[in-house]
Amino acid sequence: MSPDTVPGLVREAAELHAGALAITDHAVTLTYAELYDAVRRTATAYLALGVGSGDRVAIWAPNRHEFVLALLGAQMIGAAVVPLNTRYRGPEARDVLERSGARVLLLCNGFLETDYLGMLRDAPDATVGGDGPIPGLPSLRTVIDLGFGGAALGWDEFLAGGVRTEAGALDAAIAGVTPDTLCDVLYTSGTTGRPKGVMSSHRQTVGIGRTWAEGAELSPSDRYGIVSPFFHGFGYKAGVIAALTAGSSIHPVLTFDPPSLLAWIEAERITVLPGAPTVFIGLLGEPQLSRFDTTSLRFATCGAATVPDNLFPRMLDELHFDRVAQAYGLTECLVVTMTRPGTPIDAIAESTGQVVPGLAARIVAPSGADVPSGTDGELLLRGPSVMLGYLDDEVATRAAVDDDGWLHTGDVAHLDSLGGLKITDRLKDMFTVGGFNVYPAEVENTLSTHPDVVEAAVVGVPDDRLGEVGHAFIVPREGAVDATALSTFCRDRLANYKVPRGFSFVDAFPRTASGKVVKRGLRP
């Protein structure tokens, strides 16, 4: 069993840290030895459902210990995991489930009073037919409810089904998993507006976890509070997988609430707490901050959005972190840079850090030629952590990764004299809301299906709390258009962070000679 696979990683962690705490989730605690047994039991239950190597298992759930077991259990037998954003609405989730060909879906029906099953079944324009649990999704054979609503096969019932699996079947399935086996498919939107499935192998996913753990100096003594969602590459690979590589304990955060999180940090003695800037801005803005003991905090990375100039010093002084860092990555290559230990605080705010070991970076002009240090150009990346490609989309893969293996990120950046990477602009039409990327094309495509909309253009505008939010410009059909109705229309079809916070109505858009909308001329 190779250590460059998830099965090898989980077994190695159990051998090295058998009695140490692996995960604690309220009343549930598991040592590393117990985690290994629980993952094997979950894997056996998948086999009893007929899941095997090459199948896809979708997980639409928040940060709970069952997510970790569902994730690792599927990967233990060679199935690829497809995480779904818990903020997805029905049409978004159906699209991913359909195009990934997911055989099993695990969800938390009723989480935050959301009827996930109802959204899938009642999604606007949903297709019908088929004999599966969700009409119109013929590949989906089983839905498992992790415990909130009881609307499908229950988690305990799912696990109990594993007793039907033949002896030796699990070990045979594990033996078939290699470092090159497909490990996960993470969907990311793009300039066309339709999400693309980013594929990674076991070797890549485990390697990313190790790289992040080394940069964070993770150890078995760390208590890792994972605020970033498990469905996101950061909470999953730089979170769960990184903790496993170092033998750190995993402490999932179900929902973000500043006073509750501060109390939890104090009670659990959390040492590592990465997150988007909104997390730390929220903690620092809590009026009762001084009442909580946060001196256990050792390390945090902060990135994925614009970072205020004074945030890092305040994290050190007021939240009592020993070390703070910036980091940069994208779904297609999750860990690109991280600030090195010992970097002065003023330098941390100036760049996203240095390129991690094993990854090569170039900054190029439009001609493809390398540019001098300090000069802006497009960031290109090459190395073992660059994605395998986009699922079932060779055209998009070839557009992103050239014949020499360089991933064209679409980000404009430069390298400073210390090798620090500074992201200065985007070639891609994109903005970031609270750490989540929003591609205007997806929102525009949704708005354009409204009967009162002729055309839509969406831009990112500054926001004190979230960094940026969306604002939509609408060319309406004849008659009045209700902004509230448009917002509701979007909320029924898009995750809430993608929904424009404001709407403006115009007669026409400024355009180039070729007819392309000039968005820099659109501002509320």
Image (cartoon, rainbow, N blue to C red):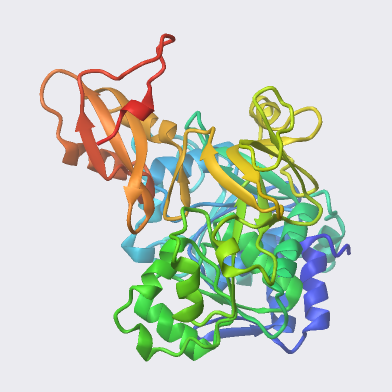
Whole-percent x and y of residue 237? 65, 60
Query: What is the quadrant of the N terminus in the image?
Result: bottom right
**Which residue is painted at 79% across and 56% down in the image?**
357
Q: Quadrant of residue 288?
A: bottom left
Total residue callouts: 0
Left or right: 496 in relation to 371? left
Vertical placement of residue 36 versus 158, above or below: below
Whole-percent x and y of residue 480? 11, 26
Whole-percent x and y of residue 24? 57, 82
Query: What is the quadrant of the C terminus in the image?
Result: top left
**Which residue is painted at 42% across and 78% down in the image?**
261
Answer whether residue 335 is visible to the viewer in this image: yes
Vertical placement of residue 220 versus 331, above or below: below
**Which residue is painted at 38% across and 74% down in the image?**
284
Answer whether residue 150 is visible to the viewer in this image: no
Left or right: 426 in relation to 337? left
Nearest to the observer: residue 214 or residue 456: 214
Left or right: 34 in relation to 120? right
Looking at the image, the residue that sits furthest to the left is 479
Nearest to the observer: residue 320 or residue 133: 320
Q: Quadrant of residue 361?
A: top right
Left or right: 346 in relation to 397? left
**Which residue is painted at 72% across and 81% down in the image?**
32
Looking at the image, the residue that sits furthest to the top is 513
Nearest to the observer: residue 457 or residue 308: 308
Whole-percent x and y of residue 31? 68, 85
